[in-house]
Every structure is written in structure tokens, then in C-alpha cells.
Image (spheres, helix red, strand yellow):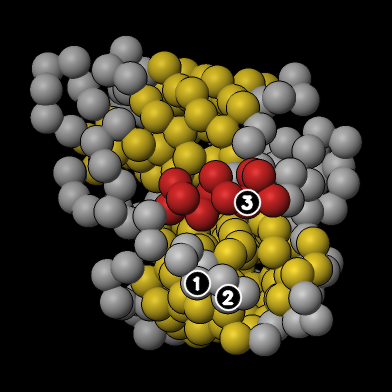
Amino acid sequence: MPVVLLLLSLAACSGDDNPDGEKSGTAMGADAFFGSFVGEVSGTEALVAVVAGPAEGEKGSGAVQIYLSDGSGLSEWFSGPISGDSFVAESDDGDAEMDGTLAADSVTGTVELPDGTTAEYRATPPSGAAGLYDLTISSAGELSGASAAGLGVTGQITLGEPGSGMLRLVDGKRLDFSVTQTPAGDLAHLRAGQVRLIVLSGGELRGMAKGQPSDAGSVDLLIQSA
């Protein structure tokens, strides 16, 4: 399921992830709650973002797309159908799995990580400018894009040893982060020039990027709060 279709549909149908801090979970029928949620994975440095919305082409059905990142090597993208108020989602490369239960004010469940360990997570509707961001990065390091609910953001990445960057959120906050380059690989199937970030309400962030250096080729970038 293409991520852009789900994110756009959520921006249109929920629109609850906003600078005024209103909750984004919206009840759809008796059991399912559509919206975006962000939180932490217990016992790890990872953050998690869950986006629940209508399943493409299946009237009355729901689906989740989930991003999990610790900003230092773990980057997993999951998807799966919603059944009642629960789901099981598999990572796009098949090496991890998540289950969860949706409610108006939270998503809770467990994740089996690629190394076989299991951890619990809890995510809540984002407030302020928190959320899951899908951004683009230019060859000059300029960032632009929006959250799952359509909140715009700009920023900059400067490569180096170490690299650094900053985001300027819609609520005016500036978030600084560190950037570590790694050998080019497959980070949750990111395309060249794509950045995926989870931002919590307190400003903590994690994510990954596949940059486009000006000398062609690509470079993988690990992103976490400075």
C-alpha cells in the first residue's frame, strides 16, 4: 500500500494533529479509531508512529502503517489490516512484526524486533507539531514536507563528521538533531531524497534519510535528537 495515499487520506479525514494540541484519534464506527499516534518503545531508544486510516479500495475497512526508528540503525516500516480495534502488521522486509490495540486516546501493543527480542510500546495522539513526518531532502541539504496530518515543516541537514541538522516546526519551535552517515543500504525502503521522522510532543525525534549528495549516488543518514 503506497504510504502517500494513506497519509493524504488521513489529512483529509482527520485533520486532528494540529498546533492547538487537540487529540487526533477519531472513532470510525464502533470499534476502529482512525488517526495518528506517536510514542516510545519500552526498554529501547526507539520511537514509534502509528497511522490508522481507511484501507485503499476496501470500503468500510481500515489499515495501519507504522514507522519505528531508534536513529542509530533500527528503521522499520510496517503495514497491516485492522480487525475490529486490533491489528497485526509485518515489516516491509519481513524481519519484524507488531501487534496492537487501537483506542481513542492510545495505541498499545508489542513489537518483535529483527534480533528476535520483544518489547512493548504505547503511542498517543500527538499534540503541537508532533507526528510522523515524510520529508524530502535536496542535494543542498534543504528539508521540506509535512506530517501525516498535513503540518508543514522546513529544515536543513549539514553533512560532516559529525553531521547536524535542524527542523523548524509549524508552531515555531526549532529542533536540532545529529546526523550520522552509514554505507548506502536499504533503510525501510526509503527512496533517494526521502526523510522519515518521528517527532514527539516534547521535541524528541528519531528517523532515517537517504540523501542525495551533489556528486551523485546516495548516502544513508541516521537522525536523532542532538
Tell me residue 200's x, y (percent): 69, 47
In the image, residue 216 sits, relative to residue 89, either above or below, namely above
Task: Point out which mark residue 61 bears.
Answer: 2
Residue 165 at x, y percent in the picture: 48, 24
Q: Name which residue type carries label 3.
A: Leu
Q: Residue at x 40, y 77 (%)?
A: 90
Q: Is 170 left or right of 166, judged from the image as shown? A: right
Choose between 16 and 210: the one closer to the eye.
Answer: 16
Q: Which corner quadrant of the image does residue 194 belong to?
A: top left
Say which amino acid is labelled 2.
Answer: Ser
In the image: residue 41, left or right of residue 184: right
Q: Residues within 10 Å of mark 2 (few under 14, many from 20)?
A: some
- C-alpha gap between disc 3 and disc 2: 14 Å
State the residue in front, 32 or 136. 32
Secondary-structure class at tag 2: loop
Residue 64: image location, x then y, percent = 54, 68
Is residue 107 at all visible to an observer of this figure? yes
Local crowd at mark 3 within 10 Å, few (<14), some, or many (≥20)?
many
**Residue 46 x, y percent position in the rendering:** 54, 60
Considering the numbered disc 1 on the image, is that residue within a helix, a strand or a loop?
A: loop
Q: Amino acid at mark 1?
A: Glu
Image quadrant occupied by the N terminus: bottom left
Q: Disc 1 or 3, which lies upstream in sequence?
A: 3
What is the secondary structure assignment of the residue under circle 3?
helix
Viewer-closest of 9 and 97: 9
Q: Which residue is mark 3?
A: 10
Q: Nearer the viewer, mark 1 or mark 3?
A: 1
Q: Nearer the viewer, mark 3 or mark 2?
A: 2
Pointer 1: what residue? 58
From the image, which quarter does the C terminus lie in?
top right
Q: Are marks 2 and 1 in contact (CB under 8 Å)?
A: yes
